[in-house]
């Protein structure tokens, strides 16, 4: 995939309504405008460092995907000794069990009405059945929601000053962080080098071109 195509895709709207599956994400980024007033210059080099994780292979996979995104965006990936910036990433998932009230509709009893009507053919009998109004009852149910988080911090290699920070998170009933990671990466790197100045919510479709690209 060409460089200009990937970053064009990163700037596409994150919502594609035709997809049956999507992930809601929240993104917040900070940038030191004194150091990177226009974001990271094209051609800048980065060293990628992941926080220690129990699943080493998953950490390597995330590192590889970050490298692909940077390279396709016109940046270089190299070792810490030669890089302009050091990019450190971390991720985690936490679960929270809560009780919700689930509504259930109970139909009302049927009411049957009988009677006679007159017509040109004489008196006719009729029977009409109606459904009376039902009621809604609420039943407590325990559910577990998982918060999946990705954090990215970029430091200037020369003086170790932090110049950019990005967060992406998503909460849902899925406990597969590996599956959701691509959506978090898309959300975070959609604002790479930028300052969002607030939380930005997005609904990332499974048909988002960059999500599909990362999964392949």
Image: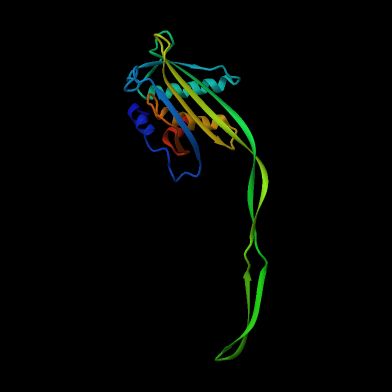
Q: Residue at x 49, y 38 (%)?
A: 24
Q: Nearer the viewer, residue 109 or 181?
A: 109
Residue 129 image position (x, y, % from top left): 63, 73
Residue 183 drawn above or below residue 193: below
Number of dots carrying numbers: 0
Residue 192 drawn above or below residue 96: above
Q: Is residue 215 in view from this perspective? A: no
Residue 76 drawn above or below residue 1: above
Residue 142 located left or right of residue 187: right
Quadrant placement of the N terminus: top left
Q: Is residue 15 in view from this perspective? A: yes
> Which color scheme did the rendering employ for the protein?
rainbow
Quarter of the image holding residue 174? top right
Q: Nearer the viewer, residue 146 or 102?
A: 102
Residue 185 image position (x, y, % from top left): 46, 28
Quarter of the image holding residue 96? top right
Q: Nearer the viewer, residue 152 or 175?
A: 152
Q: Residue at x 66, y 64 (%)?
A: 108
Q: Residue at x 65, y 77 (%)?
A: 113
Residue 43 image position (x, y, % from top left): 33, 18
Quarter of the image holding residue 79? top left
Residue 126 image position (x, y, % from top left): 62, 81
């Amino acid at each position: 995939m060409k460089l200009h195509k990937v970053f064009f895709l990163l700037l596409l709207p994150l919502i594609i309504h035709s997809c049956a599956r999507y992930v809601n994400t929240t993104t917040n980024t900070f940038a030191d405008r004194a150091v990177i007033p226009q974001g990271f210059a094209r051609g800048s080099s980065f060293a990628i460092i992941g926080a220690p994780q129990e699943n080493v292979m998953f950490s390597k996979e995330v590192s590889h995907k970050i490298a692909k995104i940077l390279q396709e965006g016109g940046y270089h990936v190299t070792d810490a000794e030669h890089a302009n910036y050091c990019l450190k990433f971390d991720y985690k998932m936490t679960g929270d069990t809560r009780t919700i009230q689930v509504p259930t509709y109970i139909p009302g009893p049927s009411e049957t009405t009988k009677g006679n009507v007159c017509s040109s053919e004489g008196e006719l009998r009729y029977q009409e059945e109606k459904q009376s109004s039902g009621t809604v009852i609420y039943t407590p149910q325990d559910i577990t929601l998982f918060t999946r988080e990705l954090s990215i911090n970029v430091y200037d290699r020369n003086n170790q000053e932090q110049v950019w920070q990005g967060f992406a998170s998503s909460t849902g009933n899925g406990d597969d962080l590996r599956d959701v990671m691509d959506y978090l990466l898309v959300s975070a790197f959609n604002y790479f080098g930028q300052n969002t100045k607030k939380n930005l919510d997005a609904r990332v479709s499974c048909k988002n071109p960059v999500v599909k690209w990362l999964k392949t």
